[in-house]
Image: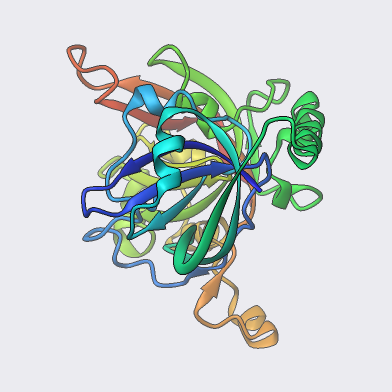
Amino acid sequence: MQEVLHVCEGPSGEWIFYVWDGTDTPATELQTLLDTEAVTPTPLHPEEAPLPREVLCTLPCVGTVLRVFSNRFSKEILHLQKDIYWARFCNITCKQEFGMWKGSLLPSSRIRLLSSEDGSVIERLKTFNGRFATQVHREPMASLHTASDITDVEFKRAGYTTLMESLTHGQVTHKFKTLVRVVAAYPCQGKELHSLLTGDYCLRLTLEDPTARIHAYVHKDNAVSFFGGFLTLAALTRKMNRLLGVPEPEDDAEEGMAGGRNPPWIWCCLKSYRLDKYDPWGSRRYRIFGTEIRD
């Protein structure tokens, strides 16, 4: 059972349902292959085009908004385009693409609209309200009892903010502390990575939590503090592999994780800024600050 928050037709003619129930989709295992980031960066959302900001700002800031795709029009879409309904999706499939979950309606799938007075809807809202009431329960469900100590952050006393809370923040500039996974990086190995410490490159990280994915940059003036000093190439690569969840050779052999990686949950400080004062939202970017990878 899900609340259908938005329905739209995608650029390719498919219908996309944006559904939510206050919970998180499971964190996924990612492919180890990382050297394609320069040509094809990891996508930030399952759909082709991002939502307009005015629609994005109507979505919840806690829990995953799952995208469910359909290649056919149904009569329920007419109702769902006019108002927000709770609905039961019957016989749909979910799969992972680029480490993100997406749903698909089958020819045999059915959508049953529910009243807001339905008992199952009321119970679901109670569960969500209980989660939203405390900060620790707002944190990613997959991170509970598993958040790593890989990083140190300056804002230790700052409250937790989801990525969606920042994306929908009322001002372009925003500083916050968050709990995320690093699902991709560019550059991530070799001499280019080592050149970060000499100020020749800017590091782009792809961060995710259950609510969103973003690109965040480690600017050249923060690279040394982010990695914890001027390190050797081997030490730098080792720290980056820990962030990305690349298994050590001995772990790979023991656990049979060849070809897969599971990035840890890490705390980091982020701030947003604009590149163009005439297009502040369109040119909005994120950078990491006040964060150091431990040895």
- The residue shown at (77%, 42%) is 120
Q: Tell me: 6 left or right of 123.
A: left
In the rendered picture of this protein, how many numbered marks are placed on residues? 0
Q: Position of residue 213 (x, y in %)?
A: 45, 44
Residue 178 placement, left or right of 47: right
* Image position of 238 (left or right of 10): right
Is residue 227 at least partly visible in the picture? Answer: no
Q: Residue at (42%, 62%) from the top-left corner?
A: 98
What x and y, as percent, mark residue 32?
A: 46, 72
Question: 246 left or right of 104?
Answer: right
Residue 280: name its quadrant.
top left
Which of the 4 image quadrants contains residue 281? top left
For this rendering, which residue is in front, 154 or 52? 52
Look at the picture and state if 150 lies above or below 166: below
Q: How is the image coloured?
A: rainbow
* Residue in front for this viewpoint, 145 or 35: 145
- Residue 60 position, x and y percent, is 57, 30
- Seen from the viewer's position, the closer of residues 24 and 243 is 24
- Residue 208 visible: yes
Q: Residue at x 39, y 38 (%)?
A: 78
Image: 50 above or below 171? below
Above or below for 79 versus 272: below
State the residue lying farthest toward the front.
75
Furthest toward the left, the residue is 278
Q: Residue at x 41, y 23 (%)?
A: 272
Q: Position of residue 12 (x, y in %)?
A: 21, 54
